[in-house]
Amino acid sequence: MGNINPEKIRNVVIAGHGGSGKTILAESILFTTGATNRFGKIADGSTTSDYNKDEISRGISINSSVLSTAWEDYKLNIIDTPGYTDFTGSVKSAMRIMDTALIVVNAAEGVEVGTEIAVNYSKEYGIESCFIVNKLDSEKANFDNCLSQLREAYGSHVAEIQFPVNEGAGFDTIVDVLKMKLIKFALDGKGSYTEYDIPVDQIEKATQLHQELIEIVAEEDEEMMSRFFDEGGTLTEAELIEGLSREIKAKKILPVLCAAGETSVGTKPLIEFLCKYCPSPLDAAPFMAKKSGTDDYVEVPPIQGGEPTIFVFKTLSEPHVGEMSFFRVLAGKVNAGMDLTNQNKNKVERLTQIFQMNGKNRKDMAEAVIGDIGAVVKLKDTHVNNTLTGKGLAVTIDPIVFPDSLIEQALTSKSKGDEDKISSGLSHLHEEDPTFLFHFDPELGQTIISGQGELHLAIIIARLKEKYGVEVNIVQPRIPFRETIKGKVESVEYKHKKQSGGHGQFGHVFLRLEPRKRGTGFEFANEVVGGAIPTKFIPAVEKGVTEALIKGPLAHYPVVDVKVTVHYGSYHDVDSSEMAFKIAGAQAFKKGFLDSKPVLLEPIYEIEVTVPETFMGDVMGDISSRRGKIAGMDSNGKMQIIKASVPLSELHDYATKLRSITQGRGIFKRKFSHYEEVPKEVETKIVAESQKEQVEA
């Protein structure tokens, strides 16, 4: 395309549950608009969106894919997002910067968890939503059931814009309520169609739906309402377009359209609808931003002549290219060769080349205007969530808040000397996917990786090997248990006495140990009187005790919530030293700890599980089998929300198990709550394992 008019840009994110046909629908849009000359297929790995080896081998979308095409004088920027909940971060980042969410619903399945996630993200970022019931050519397709579920979940705002005439095998005909035409498609994959008058057996339903739309549009505008009555209960096409666009933007209408992506049935009317009725970047609400270095918010309105401002929502490391940063222009325009300031890092970056992307294919762009989506390579220090601006504006856009991790694993290198390569590779993979996190835990002595599910982390490990040439072993992370006491010991004595030629060692202490309230930590007190222990040796006693806290006497886990008081002792004028009293303090503590009813504590997490009501019994039973305690239940439409507390040691495989129990329809989130005493039978096993490890070490 030549010069782009921002009013003619449509930014659309395609989202929905896994298996609803998003990638093929995107492929159909590209093919019918001429952006591609071949209709790619998932089976042979030839789609524009899913071009990575792991996507092709698994037959699913793993990354979001930025696409672009043209229709008449419109430019469509499309982001095809994954449907599996392991990759939900890609959905959220796309929702953050697009203007319309096209939410794909499987005609045979109806509203699923992925539908809910997509709708919730679109609401969070305040973007317009349209539903498209896809796969209407499947044998089990049921449009009316999908429509009923959508209305049950999202209310009376759900509006039937089209309905199918012959859903199921051979589906090729829809009725368009806006055009008031029957549309019959050629099943050649090109999306071509012929319009006919609506037949008698469909006209009553179509007329009623058309009239309902007109009334909704008219009742929100007094002037339009007046014209509505003056013109005998109807509106002109231009008035209908204007009014319907306004209602979609105000979220007062959630349109429902029809499609069968594999045959391109419904694709061209969908594109026409997006162009006619959905918002341009100039219609978008201003992005909120902080003035750099302050907490004061300002608006960044979509102004064509404004100071150039871009927001980076995705990065990708490409072989032979380097790191590619994907951005949206929020204000003004940017040109190749332009210098902008990264406001998050306070560094100047040069946009050497700007690309328009279509999957892995890129094409040079001389400039990117407000609202457009582009990519740039070889920025020195720019990452996801960074804001780059011209000299006249110093603001940072609020970042995308990615979902919390749901699963953790630990990894070790298969080959000595690969540690630096592993760290570098993990860092690059985190930049590409901010929902993947990693860190070294010094307490556990393990590198911990975390993400949204087992599949998510399996993909990360596979890419670590493929891209960075390193292999790792995956093990279950150790649990950060804690040790404490329940009883009180009034006095425990330890005398450290050693004579080995020259000066000897002498330190003699009496300690009192008592439990503290959970979460209050360690306290050391000195009640020595009369110089039984010289004041200069008291810090050494405390140091001995605090060092002994690091690896507790029970199972070598950190000790918490204990008060230790040194109240008596003795010393030797020559042989006493700080080291002697440090050793005496540590040994007295260890001895007293084991006499003070020691117990093991484990981390407890709060979980919130969202599942269809059908699976509630199985999910609650599984939580109970994990030593979980149900705290309460709520409902959200057809979904039930179970709140519970579960030990971390029982959550290792929970994401996978939940999906298995609920046929992929259950989701959960978790957060640390508190530490709680481990049941005695479990504690005995953990202590035995710890002692075995110490012997083997």
Image (tube, rainbow, N blue to C red):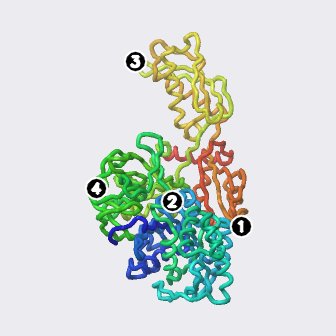
**Direction from residue 324 to residue 687 in the image, left or right:** right
* Between discs 1 and 4, the one toward the N terminus: 4
Residue 198, quarter of picture: bottom right
Q: Which residue is mark 4?
A: 338
- Amino acid type, mark 1: Thr
Where 96 falls versus 664 (above or below)? above
- Residue at the spot 61% in from the left edge and 82% down from the top edge: 164
Query: Gap between marks 2 and 3, in whole Å?
Result: 71 Å
- Are the residues tagged 2 and 1 within 8 Å (C-beta)? no
SS at badge 3: loop
Q: Which residue is mark 2?
A: 92
Query: Gap between marks 4 and 3, in whole Å?
Result: 76 Å
Q: Which residue is mark 3?
A: 502
In front here: 108 or 652? 108
Q: Which residue is mark 1?
A: 614
In front here: 246 or 131? 246
Are there few (<14), some (14-19), or many (20+) residues within 10 Å of tag 1?
Answer: few
- Amino acid type, mark 3: Gly
* Between discs 3 and 1, the one toward the N terminus: 3
- Residue at the spot 48% in from the left edge and 56% down from the top edge: 435
- Estimate the x, y position of residue 325 in percent, counting from the top left: 36, 59
* Between discs 2 and 4, the one toward the N terminus: 2
Query: Gap between marks 2 and 1, in whole Å?
Result: 28 Å
- Amino acid type, mark 4: Met
In front here: 121 or 656? 121
